[in-house]
Amino acid sequence: MIRFEALTKRYGRHRAVEALSLELAAGEVVALLGPNGSGKTTSLKVAAGLVLPTSGRVLAGEPPASTRDPAARRVLSFLPQRVSFPESLTGREVLEFYRRLRGAPAGAAEQALRAASLDGAAERAVGTYSGGMTQRLGLAVAALPDARAYLLDEPTSALDAEGLAAFYALVERWRGEGRTVLFSSHQLGDAERLADRIAILVDGRLVAALGQRELADRLAARGRMRLRLDACPAGLAERLAALAPGARWTGEELVIPGPPALRAQALELARAAGAEIRSLSAEDGRLEPLYRELVEGSA
Ligand SMILES: Nc1ncnc2c1ncn2[C@@H]1O[C@H](COP(=O)(O)OP(=O)(O)OP(=O)(O)O)[C@@H](O)[C@H]1O
């Protein structure tokens, strides 16, 4: 549905994006992650046809056409990182203006207001909106067109819990309807909650693109099991460390790092050693340390 083909964007001698190749299928939700200045906004703006690439291209639609072509842009909807609207207009008036501009049907503004959970504030002047409400309005505007792909630049940065829930529900609906979503975020929770795939940019380069399966495997491998014991039988910690490097006895519990597949063997060793297991817990690794490692490992 969207294809980045060796996209490079330079500002003077500075390379904002370098040879980015990434393909998003219909109905796929991809989170674009990366530190400040890593090229997320630039990539989204080129995809939206707002910034010209230095080389390479971004294609969208069926049949695929360059997003420099207005026909291709008609299948896209873009939410900029910062939105601002005329302060004296009400939320409904802003939406009505954009509805006509995008040629969306009459009921679309109402539906978008509800989807962004903004219907209670529709008659208020936009100048009285909080930052989060303005972001919800931006999201409502982006949700207006019947687009095949939504490009959203940090859609959740100012949202509270209710706004976040509305955004998650909107993306789930789009996914269910076979629409493609590419969003940038600094909130790893958004990626964990929504993304079929995460793509990480560092200094303009794509350093990782992990699908859900691969991500789940990587996170599971970083998991750990904890066995609470009254006492650790002699030699057990060493035998466990041979099975699962890093396994250790804290004085209260055995901590056994590694993927779930290892846990049955570890339990067997503990039982064979005569350990009295008081309680057992297991957890998967978190995205945050994996993300940091991928970002730092690429430096
Ligand atoms: N119009 C511009 N002129 C010159 N340099 C620019 C311009 N726009 C972006 N850059 C530079 O390109 C690089 C990538 O910027 P970009 O805004 O794409 O990053 P980002 O990943 O979206 O960052 P953030 O997370 O802070 O929003 C940065 O070094 C930035 O300073």
Image (cartoon, rainbow, N blue to C red):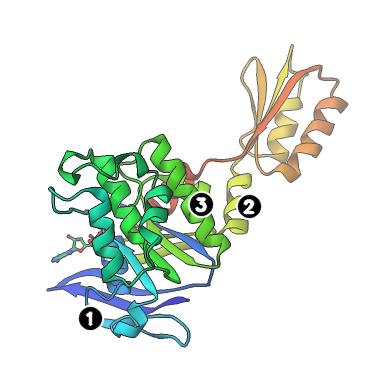
Number of numbered discs on residues = 3
Closer to the camera in the image, 147 or 212: 147
Compared to residue 202, the image places residue 293 above or below, namely above
Q: Mark 3 or mark 1: name the one nearer the start of the chain.
A: 1
- The residue to which callout 3 is attached is 194
Q: Nearer the viewer, mark 1 or mark 2?
A: 1
Residue 177 position (above or below residue 173)? below
Q: Measured from the top left, where is residue 168 in percent x and y?
A: 48, 48
Q: Residue at x 43, y 50 (%)?
A: 115
Up the image or down, 181 lies above or below 140; here it is below
How crowded pointer 1 is (Cα within 10 Å; few <14, some 14-19, many 20+) is rated as some
What amino acid is labelled 3 in the image?
A: Leu
Taking the image as four quarters, which one is ligand 1 found in?
Answer: bottom left
Note whether residue 81 is visible: no
Of mark 1 and mark 2, the one earlier in the sequence is 1
Look at the numbered disc 2 and give the secondary structure of its residue.
helix
Neighbours of disc 3 within 10 Å: few (<14), some (14-19), many (20+): some
Q: Is mark 2 within 8 Å of ligand 1?
A: no
Q: Earlier in the sequence, mark 2 or mark 3?
A: 3
- Mark 1 residue element: loop
Residue type indicated by callout 1: Thr
**Of the two numbered discs 2 and 3 in the rendering, the one whose residue sits closer to the viewer:** 3
Kindly identify which numbered label has been placed on residue 217: 2
